[in-house]
Image: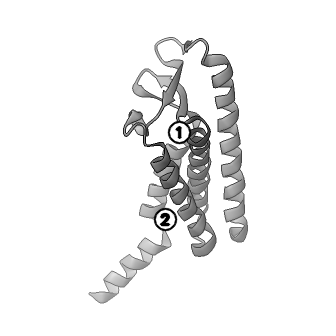
Amino acid sequence: MEGKMPVIALIIGALLAVADQVIKYFVLTHLQPVGSVTVIDGLLDLKYVENRGVAFGMFSDMRWFFVVVTAILIGIIIFIMFKKKPTGKLFYISAALIIGGGIGNLIDRVFYGFVVDYLSLSFFPPVCNFADYCITAGTILLVIYVLFFSNTIKSEKKVSKSDE
């Protein structure tokens, strides 16, 4: 099963990117004309936002820079999956989330020149989208994997103990 994990992660990432684009299609066709809709009063609104930057709208109008950086990061993750073949499903789950979310937002940047955002939580001011949450969850899981489950770090700890 471990040998199939990179392919499975890519398929899941592709499905997440497709889901993201389907949601954004409905946002563009139904939410954009009205601008905002309250889903749960005081908690969740759907607000149409054209984000020309990255997180929280920072570094706006650097479209092609973010296209290149995103493509490079996705390429690095795919390279690691197929060449380094990390062990553990947690790595591949995090990779699928990051790849899927990255591709979803990459498509927006290339075709629209901005990322379509629409999820507005009352306790988290920035308006985000499904892809953003995939990337965030994937990054958190990747950090957990690297800190607690990665063989590389465990083997470095063993080497340093044997050096003493």
Mark 2–mark 1 CB contact (< 8 Å): no
Q: Which of marks 2 and 1 is nearer the N terminus?
A: 1
The residue nearer to you, when weighing 105 against 120, is 105
The residue nearer to you, when weighing 136 against 50, is 50
Residue 112, relative to residue 106: is it above or below?
Answer: above
Using the rendered image of the protein, determine whether residue 141 is visible from the camera's viewpoint.
no
Residue 141, relative to residue 53: is it above or below?
Answer: below
Q: Which amino acid does label 1 sit on?
A: Tyr
Front position among marks 2 and 1: 1
Q: What number of labels is visible?
A: 2
Q: Where is residue 151 in the image (x, y as percent from the top left)?
A: 49, 73
The quarter of the picture where residue 123 lies is top left
Q: Which residue is drawn at 55% across and 14% down?
A: 35
The residue nearer to you, when weighing 113 against 140, is 113
Q: Where is residue 83 in the image (x, y as percent from the top left)?
A: 60, 74
Residue position marked by numbered label 1 in the rendering? 133
Residue found farthest to the bottom: 163
Residue 149 shown left or right of residue 18 in the figure = left
Residue 97: mark in rendering: none
User: Mark 1 falls on what kind of element?
Assistant: helix
Residue 159, relative to residue 69: is it above or below?
Answer: below
Residue 149: mark in rendering: 2
Residue 123 shown left or right of residue 82 in the figure = left
Dividing the image into 4 quarters, which one contains the C terminus?
bottom left
**Which colour assignment does the render follow?**
one colour
Q: Where is residue 37 in the image (x, y as percent from the top left)?
A: 57, 13
Q: What residue type is labelled 2?
A: Phe
Using the rendered image of the protein, determine whether residue 22 is visible from the camera's viewpoint.
yes
Residue 53, relative to residue 96: is it above or below?
Answer: above
Q: Which residue is drawn at 70% across and 71% down?
A: 3
Q: Position of residue 9 (x, y in %)?
A: 67, 57
